[in-house]
Image: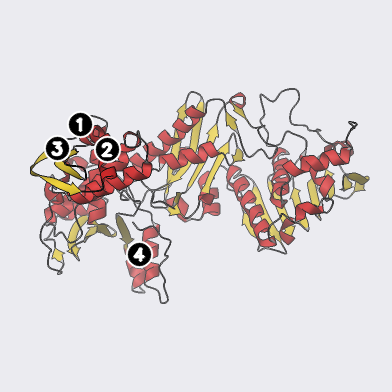
C-alpha cells in the first residue's frame, strides 16, 4: 500500500481528538488564550452543554487580520520561539484553534486595543469561510457552534448536556482560583449565571467564592520552600472534608493541573486524620523554574512531569503536615452549623457522613488563638484515664466552680459531663462539647507516635499472660512481626498451634482488652498481606492500640481530669479529630445558641 500525505483538514481532525475531547476542553483552551492575552474580564456563554454554543469574550490585547489568519493555522503561536525549556504561558502548542475549527463552526472577532477597527474570521470543518473587517470592541470574541459536527462519531461519546455544562463550570472554577485578579462570568441558556468578581491579590477571597465562605474559616495557610521549589496555598483542617476529591486544586507556575503525584501527596499528608471515603479540601500552588517541569506531556496540558518528583512530593507532604501540627487541631466550624441544622424540622442525617505563588499573609482568622499563658495551665494529671471503671450513673457530673480565667483557654473550663461520655466546657464566648473517648484516643496515639520516633515504648508486664485463641494462620502472621510489635510495647509469643500469649502491653494504654487488640491486629496484617506490611504501617498499628487503650464511653471523670484532658488537647497536634477522622469536639458560639432561641 502506497504512503501518502494526509490533508491538512484530516491532520487537524486527528489532532482535535487529543486536544478537544469535549466542550470543556475547548472552553479551557479558549480561556487560556484570553488569559495569555492579558484579559482582566472573561465572559463564557454556553448552550446545550457547550455542544450547540460556546462563546468566550475577553478584553485582552486582541488580534489584527494577519494574526487571525495565522491563529487558525496549526502550530502558529506567539508564545514560544525556539525552545520548550522556558514556557511561561498557559498555551504554547498552537493547536487549539485549528483543532476546534476542524470539527466545529468557528468564528473569531477581534480588535487590537490601539486599533479603530476589528476583523472577523470564520472556519467550518477545517476550511476558512471568510476573513473580513467587522465591528468589534477591544479584545476578542471566539464563538464555537455545533461542536463535532464534522466528526459525528465523537458526539456519541459525550455525556448529557447537564454533565458537559458541569465540566465547563469546573474548568472556570479552576481558572478563577488561579487568577483572582480576573473577573469571570459564566452564563447561558442551559445554566444559571455564575460570577466571580475580581479580588485582586486576595487569593483567599477568591477561594471562598469558589469553595464556599466556610473554607476561609477552616483553611490553614501554607508557605514552604525546598531547593528553589516553593509551595503556597491553603489546606483545610482534617474535619473539614468532602465526599470526593473535586475540592482539591493544584497549580504549577500558575497552570491548573490534575497531576497524580500532587493528589497522591495530598492523600499522604492527611493519612490517619481523615476517614476512609472522605477527602481533604486543599488549594496548592507550586512555583519552580520552568526548566524543572515538563508541561508538554499531553496535548491537553493537564499533566506535568517534574524533574525531581520526590522533592515535590516531600515538599507537599512536609508542608501540609507541619501546618496541621501547627494549626490543624481545631474542629471544623461546620460542626456548629450541622448541629443547628439538626434542630430544624424534617432534618435527616447524612448517611455518608464519616462515622467516626500565594502569600500566607492572607491566612484566615483562627477561631481559637493559642493563649500566651499555657505555662500557667493547671498541671492536673490524667495518666489514669485509661483504666476502665464500673458503669457510672446516668446523671450528669457537674464541675464545681472553676476560676473564670480558665474560660480564656481555647477549650474553656469543664462544667459538666453528660451521659458519661461528653464533656461540656464553657469558653469566653460560647461552649464546647467534647467526645471524651475520641479525644483521649487521639492524645494516646500522638504520644505513641512521638515515642515511636525516639525509643522503644515502655511496656507493662502482665502478672498472668493472656492467652488469645485465633486461627493458626493469624498466629503465623503475628509472629512474623513480633519484633515490630515489641517496639510498640506489645510482647507476644506462640502458645500452641492456634493461640498467642500476650506477656506485655504498652504501659501508656493502662488496662487494655488484649484479646480484642490481638484479633484486630491479626485482621489488619492479613489485609496488608505483605512481609514488610507492619514495619511500613507502625503508625496504623499505634492508632489501633490507642483506640483499645483510650478512655471508654461510660467512664465518669472527675473535674480535674476533664480539665486536664482539655488542656492536653490544646497542645496536642491533630486533637481536633480522632484517629478515624471523626471530630473530637464541637464549638457553639453564643451567637449560635442565641439563634436556637430566636434571640438573634
Residue denoted by label 4: 591
Dot 4 or dot 3, earlier in sequence: 3
Direction left: furthest residue: 463
Residue at left offset 73%, top offset 58% = 46
Badge 3 is on which residue?
Answer: 459
- Name which of mark 2 and mark 1 comes first in the sequence: 2
Front-lying residue, 295 or 423: 295
The residue located at (77%, 35%) in the rendering is 94
| Residues under numbered marks 4 and 1 in contact, where contact means CB atoms less than 8 Å apart | no
Dividing the picture into quarters, in which one does residue 72 lie? Answer: top right
The Cα atoms of the two marked residues, 3 and 1, are separated by 9 Å
Q: Nearer the viewer, mark 2 or mark 4?
A: 2
Image position of 456 with respect to 504: above or below: above
Query: Exactly how many numbered labels are in the figure?
Result: 4
* Side of 149 where 569 appears, left or right: left
- Asked which secondary structure carries label 1, the reply is loop
Q: In this rendering, does residue 355 appear at all?
A: yes
Which part of the image, by quadrant, shows the C terminus? Answer: bottom left
Q: Nearer the viewer, residue 488 or 19?
A: 488
Residue occupied by mark 1: 456
Give the crowd class for mark 3: few <14, some 14-19, many >=20 residues within 10 Å: many
Q: Earlier in the sequence, mark 2 or mark 4?
A: 2
Q: CA distance from mark 2 to mark 4?
A: 38 Å
Mark 3 / mark 2, whichever is N-terminal: 2
Alpha carbon distance from label 2 to label 1: 11 Å
* Residue named by callout 2: 449
**Disc 3, SS:** strand
Q: CA distance from mark 4 to mark 3?
A: 48 Å
Asked if residue 377 can be seen in this view, the reply is: no
- Distance from Cα at disc 3 to Cα at disc 2: 15 Å
Name the spot of residue 148 as percent of width and height, x first.
80, 52
Amino acid at each position: 500500500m502506497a504512503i501518502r500525505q494526509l490533508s491538512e483538514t484530516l491532520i487537524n481532525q486527528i489532532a482535535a481528538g487529543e486536544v478537544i475531547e469535549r466542550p470543556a476542553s475547548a472552553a479551557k483552551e479558549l480561556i487560556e488564550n484570553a488569559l495569555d492575552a492579558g484579559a482582566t474580564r472573561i465572559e463564557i456563554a454556553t448552550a446545550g452543554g457547550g455542544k450547540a454554543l460556546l462563546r468566550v469574550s475577553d478584553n485582552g490585547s486582541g488580534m489584527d487580520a494577519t494574526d487571525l489568519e495565522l491563529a487558525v493555522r496549526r502550530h502558529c503561536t506567539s508564545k514560544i520561539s525556539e525552545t520548550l525549556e522556558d514556557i511561561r504561558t498557559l498555551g504554547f502548542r498552537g493547536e487549539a484553534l485549528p483543532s476546534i475549527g476542524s470539527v466545529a463552526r468557528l468564528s473569531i472577532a477581534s480588535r487590537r486595543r490601539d486599533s479603530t477597527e476589528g476583523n472577523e474570521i470564520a472556519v467550518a470543518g477545517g476550511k476558512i469561510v471568510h476573513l473580513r473587517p467587522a465591528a468589534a470592541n477591544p479584545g476578542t470574541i471566539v464563538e464555537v457552534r455545533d461542536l463535532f459536527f464534522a466528526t459525528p462519531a465523537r458526539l456519541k461519546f459525550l455525556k448529557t448536556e447537564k454533565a458537559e455544562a458541569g465540566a465547563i463550570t469546573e474548568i472556570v472554577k479552576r481558572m478563577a482560583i488561579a487568577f483572582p485578579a480576573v473577573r469571570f462570568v459564566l452564563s447561558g441558556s442551559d445554566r444559571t449565571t455564575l460570577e466571580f468578581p475580581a479580588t485582586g491579590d486576595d487569593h483567599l477571597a477568591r477561594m471562598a467564592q469558589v469553595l464556599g465562605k466556610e473554607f476561609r474559616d477552616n483553611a490553614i495557610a501554607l508557605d514552604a520552600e525546598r531547593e528553589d521549589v516553593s509551595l503556597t496555598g491553603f489546606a483545610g483542617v482534617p474535619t473539614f472534608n468532602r465526599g470526593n476529591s473535586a475540592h482539591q486544586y493544584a497549580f504549577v507556575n500558575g497552570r491548573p493541573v490534575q497531576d497524580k503525584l500532587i493528589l497522591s501527596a495530598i492523600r499522604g499528608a492527611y493519612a490517619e486524620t481523615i476517614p476512609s471515603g472522605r477527602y481533604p479540601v486543599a488549594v496548592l500552588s507550586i512555583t519552580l523554574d520552568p526548566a524543572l517541569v515538563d508541561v508538554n506531556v499531553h496535548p491537553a496540558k493537564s499533566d506535568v512531569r517534574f524533574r525531581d518528583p520526590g522533592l515535590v512530593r516531600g515538599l507537599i507532604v512536609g508542608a501540609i503536615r507541619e501546618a496541621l501540627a501547627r494549626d490543624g487541631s481545631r474542629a471544623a466550624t461546620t460542626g456548629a452549623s450541622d448541629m443547628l441544622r439538626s434542630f430544624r424540622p424534617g432534618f435527616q442525617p447524612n448517611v455518608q457522613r464519616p462515622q467516626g505563588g500565594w502569600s500566607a499573609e492572607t491566612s484566615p482568622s483562627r477561631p481559637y488563638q493559642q493563649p500566651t499563658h499555657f505555662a500557667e495551665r493547671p498541671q492536673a494529671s490524667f495518666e489514669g484515664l485509661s483504666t476502665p471503671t464500673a458503669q457510672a450513673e446516668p446523671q450528669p457530673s457537674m464541675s464545681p466552680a472553676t476560676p473564670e480565667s480558665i474560660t480564656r483557654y481555647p477549650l474553656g473550663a469543664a462544667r459538666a459531663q453528660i451521659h458519661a461520655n461528653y464533656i461540656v466546657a464553657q469558653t469566653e464566648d460560647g461552649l464546647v462539647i467534647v467526645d471524651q473517648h475520641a479525644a483521649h484516643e487521639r492524645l494516646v496515639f500522638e504520644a505513641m507516635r512521638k515515642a515511636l520516633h525516639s525509643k522503644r515504648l515502655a511496656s507493662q508486664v502482665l502478672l498472668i499472660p493472656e492467652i488469645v485463641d485465633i486461627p493458626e494462620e493469624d498466629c503465623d502472621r503475628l509472629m512474623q512481626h513480633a519484633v515490630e510489635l515489641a517496639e510498640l510495647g506489645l510482647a507476644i509469643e506462640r502458645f500452641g498451634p492456634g493461640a498467642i500469649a500476650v506477656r506485655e502491653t504498652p504501659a501508656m494504654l493502662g488496662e487494655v482488652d488484649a484479646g480484642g487488640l490481638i484479633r484486630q491486629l491479626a485482621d489488619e496484617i492479613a489485609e496488608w498481606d505483605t512481609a514488610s506490611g507492619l514495619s511500613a504501617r507502625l503508625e496504623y498499628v499505634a492508632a489501633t492500640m490507642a483506640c483499645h487503650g483510650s478512655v471508654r464511653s461510660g467512664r465518669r471523670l472527675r473535674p480535674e481530669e476533664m480539665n486536664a484532658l482539655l488542656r492536653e488537647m490544646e497542645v496536642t497536634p491533630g486533637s481536633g479529630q480522632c484517629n478515624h477522622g471523626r471530630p473530637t469536639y464541637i464549638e457553639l458560639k453564643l451567637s449560635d445558641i442565641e439563634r436556637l432561641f430566636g434571640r438573634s
